[in-house]
Amino acid sequence: MDSSRRQSGIQQLLAAEQEAQQIVNAARAAKSARLRQAKEEAEREIAEYRAQMEAEFQRKVAESSGDSGANVKRLEEETAAKIEQLNQQAASISPEVIQMLLRHVTTVKN
């Protein structure tokens, strides 16, 4: 009877070991599934963030390129106004400069 008890004890141990192995395998499979799911979620979040940042970048590019045309026009208008102002100033002092130059050229010092 002692050998049959040993044999049944060994059988119980083998069954318990197989059951434990199945539990470990199930836990590993569950862990792999959770890791895979977390990776997919992270990739999805990254893709959403990337799309959001790209949309914001495109919006800023569109705003700045739209403004550049307005900026160029504004700068051209400012430049034309300053050129006109300089021409008016030159015209107003031109006779004085001509008189000063003539005086210095025609005056002879001994």
Image: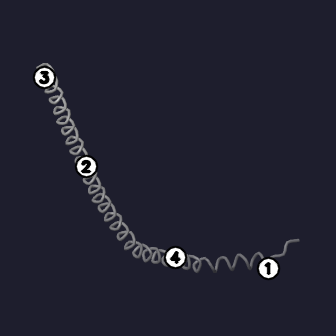
In primary-sequence order, the first of circles 3 and 2 is 3
Instruction: Report helix, strand or loop for mark 3.
Output: helix
Query: What amino acid type is highlighted by mark number 2?
Result: Ala
Mark 4 or mark 3: whose residue is earlier in sequence: 3
Observer-side mark, 4 or 3, equals 3
Q: Where is mark 2, residue-wise? A: 38
Determine the CA span between mark 4 and mark 1.
Answer: 32 Å
Residue at the spot 32% in from the left edge and 60% down from the top edge:
50
Q: Position of residue 100 (x, y in %)?
A: 70, 75
**Is label 1 in a helix, a strand or a loop?**
helix
Q: Report how far apart the C-alphas of labels 4 and 2 lie in the structure.
A: 68 Å
Residue 85 is tagged as 4
Does residue 25 appear left or right of residue 81 in this picture? left
User: Residue at image x 19%, y 42%?
Assistant: 26
- Figure check: 68 above or below 38: below
Three-letter amino acid code at the position of disc 1: Thr
Residue located at (19% from left, 36% from top): 18
User: Against 29, is 81 above or below?
Assistant: below
Q: Residue furthest left?
A: 1
What residue is pinned by disc 1? 106
- The quarter of the picture where the N terminus appears is top left
- Rendered image: mark on residue 5: 3
Which numbered disc covers residue 78?
none
- Left or right placement of residue 4 versus residue 70 in this view: left
Query: What's under tag 4, amino acid-wise?
Result: Gln
Using the numbered discs, state the Cα–Cα distance from disc 3 to disc 2 in whole angstroms: 49 Å
First-in-chain label (3 vs 1) = 3
Please give the name of the residue rendered at 67% of the width and 76% of the height, measured from the top-left corner.
97
Q: CA distance from mark 4 to mark 3?
A: 116 Å
* Cα–Cα span, label 3 and label 1: 141 Å
- Pointer 3 local density, CA inside 10 Å: few below 14, some 14–19, many at least 20: few
